[in-house]
Amino acid sequence: MAKDKASRRPRAETPKGFRDYFGADVTERKAMLDAVAEVYHRYGFDPLETSAVETVEALGKFLPDVDRPNEGVFGWQDEDGDWLALRYDLTAPLARVAAQFRNDLPSPYRRYAMGPVWRNEKPGPGRFRQFYQCDADTVGAASVAADAEICAMLSDALEVVGIPRGDYIVRVNNRKVLNGVMEVAGVLDPSDPAKFEAERGIVLRAIDKIDRLGETGVRALLGAGRKDESGDFTKGAGLSDEQAEVVMGFMAARRDTGAATAARLRELVGASTLGCEGVQELETIAELLDAQGYGPDRIVVDPAVVRGLGYYTGPVFEAELTFEILDEKGRKRQFGSVAGGGRYDDLVKRFTGQSVPATGVSIGVDRLLAALRAKGRAGAEAQGPVVVTVMDRDRLGDYMAMVGELRRAGLRAELYLGNPKNFGNQLKYADARKSPVAVIQGSDEAARGVVVLKDLVLGAQIAAGASLEQWKSRPAQVEVPRADLVRAVQDMLS
Amino acid sequence: MAKDKASRRPRAETPKGFRDYFGADVTERKAMLDAVAEVYHRYGFDPLETSAVETVEALGKFLPDVDRPNEGVFGWQDEDGDWLALRYDLTAPLARVAAQFRNDLPSPYRRYAMGPVWRNEKPGPGRFRQFYQCDADTVGAASVAADAEICAMLSDALEVVGIPRGDYIVRVNNRKVLNGVMEVAGVLDPSDPAKFEAERGIVLRAIDKIDRLGETGVRALLGAGRKDESGDFTKGAGLSDEQAEVVMGFMAARRDTGAATAARLRELVGASTLGCEGVQELETIAELLDAQGYGPDRIVVDPAVVRGLGYYTGPVFEAELTFEILDEKGRKRQFGSVAGGGRYDDLVKRFTGQSVPATGVSIGVDRLLAALRAKGRAGAEAQGPVVVTVMDRDRLGDYMAMVGELRRAGLRAELYLGNPKNFGNQLKYADARKSPVAVIQGSDEAARGVVVLKDLVLGAQIAAGASLEQWKSRPAQVEVPRADLVRAVQDMLS
């Protein structure tokens, strides 16, 4: 059988849904995460790096969002028949670690984790199968002081990476308040928590759609149901107008201060024990934040936050960037959410049977990085290395000595390592490297003990804008004594 | 069927062969890799972070060491039937990237990569299935200036992380010289490279065993064969004494200077074109390094280096730490190799059909970190956070304000977030956290506007060594005005 030679070659392709990060992609993300880690460290959080691989058993059904398919992991069977899989988030591994090392870890245990996670989901534009997460969690602290601390830390982290105060807001709500409202609205019976689950689901989804459907649409979903523009009908929760009013009132409960919002919420959940507990927790959080100077310019109580509600058991929080950007269609819109989290108290229970309170936050690494780029706060280091060119192949040692001197002075520098025959290629290379300065020394310059420095930044400016006369009158290159190489390059770069 | 409730709980276990890294494990490695990255960056190398997942097709048979099984990867089939796997090193992904993005990348392309790799191999003591690699490679540079640069960069990197000059040596050899020696010894026929492959394999393995078998043992393997202590017989390469003499001479060819070693090698490979080319390359590398001031105190030509020879095609190098440590049995031995690499010119060819020269180095991250710990150069940050205790649960806001002030002053500080009822538990927690200072304020101190600072470092020293009288006379705690909190803690820490 004749084989086609070309067809036997493997394809050089990143697997579908995966991507590679080059140069500044890596350094910008690293700079951002390093800055965040510094804040987390100052707050007493310790780094934890778990293995990328977990047993499927340990990952379990512990998905942060019940809407996501349980199967969405990359898994395989090991030699003993155990199923292993890549972690899909950083919370499930924390649960495993908190259970496995419960006798060795400090309690409460504050930890942060940063690293890739993997999701076996259909890839799409901007949706990858491997992406970074950046989490901080406190395990073993029942006090809402832990939640307040995480909100303050999130606020600090955003400022430290370059989001100025006023351009973000951390919004805090409490799952218990919402459950209290459900109770008052008649779709939660504390003595039979499973009852009305379908109705509560409809209410939650309705609340989450307020931005898109407006008040009328949400009211329709809370009541009999809603027919959309296409004529499709969505079944409603079947609340009476009075019951619906309670829910609508909840969403509009935000007032100017945390205390005023809490007072309004207290009115709404009046009859519900759980609801009152939730309001009390929000008040405590607001007080604790206030005591540290985190006012409503940074962190607010906002009943409209309804994130991941199937998962959280108490306070929930979300950081939103409030500055405007242009979307794909050129319309102005707020940048939106970049981080969120909350309290989830059944973390370790599936392993040990013992309930352990926990609360945490996850920063959307790619979203936040995109925000920093939109604000011009990332990507400062666009400048490439100084390139020492090779005019005379027999004097590689001389050129390497130049590169060595530049590097020892702390400058980023390269020797051109390609075939030096075509000098034009060397300048093209310097250009591709975004090099600010090319160093040139032919045998003539070597004999006279000088080097030529070509200012490539100035050169590009001249080439772009200048007439021939200007070009000639401002040659973007200088000749300096060989001994002055480092100083002269430093001058040109400054 | 009655199910045992306990048996339905998942096991909280790291999968076999994997491990978790806590606190200082993470920060020490990160500090080391950050320092290395800074050197690589200064040399003009750009970071590259490929996805952890590759197609098995792209990984191919491109294993750095032919002795390793090809199957040693964690793989699975995706929804389209393609086989995917976790990368087992950072070189195979580089090959894929260099082929995939060959029109966009600068040429030559200098890149570094740091991150975990996965090996589906039997785990053992100190052998894990996930571990870090730290690589730097130059793709597209045929000149041995690229190899010399990598040796210099490796030397700089070792010094920057904390291995002082004199405690390490970078040894350089050349695969071509060894092949020249093989030619002279009669086990390589340039017109029929496949001939004598088995014999060359025996010679290579014999050379690699010189430390263990000594000259006599190696000579036996080069000749008829060798019977070991147990009586087992290993077949030899069948060289005559004269041929074996050439090989033995090669291993002993190192002289005081690179030039002298090269001269000796030139004698040995005299008749072989390939061998002469190799010697010439070693001479050039030594000259280029000399021109930058990297003398034999840092980098030497050493014919005894025979690493990964099935893979490399030209210069090979290895960094060895020369200081002594005690092994498990308390015997002194040299720390040994922490990094190695060389030239491998068929990197991209399997994808594109086009040969692309490349050279690179890989640092053994765990080995180097172990060396730094052995030298006391890592693990400086053993000190934990300042712990603010909770004496009075109603004044959480006051305590949080203290923590906030300390953090704003750049100090690492924590509020005790566990149940505050038992104060002894709070001090135990501070102890577990290696906290240097505990801050205490009961209602009495609050009324008087003071806080108590407990010096836990001094306290531990006193507890360990002092008599009861001394203990009493040097109470390791002070009372300071509340307003002086930050300054007083800073004083205590300094």
Image: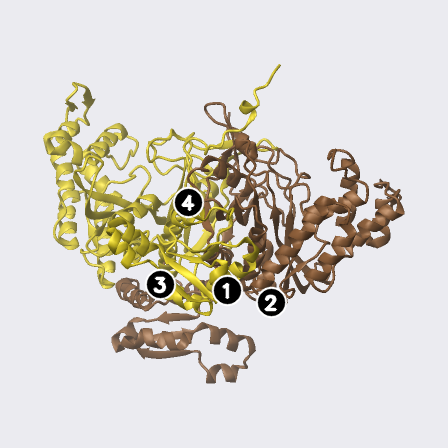
Chain colours: A brown, B yellow
Q: Among all residues in the image, which is located at the extreme top?
A: B1
> Which residue is at 68% across, 49% downward?
A278
Secondary structure under the numbered disc 1 in the rendered image: helix
Earlier along the polypeptide chain: callout 4 or callout 1?
A: 4
Mark 2 vs mark 3: in front: 3
Q: What type is the residue that disc 3 sits on? A: Met
> Which numbered dot is residue B447?
1
Q: What type is the residue that disc 2 sits on? A: Arg
Secondary structure under the numbered disc 2 in the rendered image: loop
Q: What type is the residue that disc 1 sits on? A: Ala
Q: Is residue B163 visible in this depiction of the protein?
A: no
User: Both on one chain, marks 1 and 2?
Assistant: no
**Residue B259: quarter of image:** bottom left
Quarter containing the N terminus of chain B: top right
Residue A408: where, in percent of width, then height? Answer: 30, 66
> Which numbered dot is residue B22?
4
Crowd around label 4: few <14 · some 14–19 · many ≥20 (10 Å):
some
Chain containing the residue with disc 4: B
Mark 4 vs mark 1: in front: 1
Mark 1 vs mark 2: in front: 1
Distance between mark 1 and mark 3 Cα atoms: 24 Å
Chain containing the residue with disc 1: B
Chain containing the residue with disc 2: A
Q: Is residue B486 visible in this depiction of the protein?
A: yes
Front residue of this view, candidates A288 and B53: A288
Residue under circle 3? B492
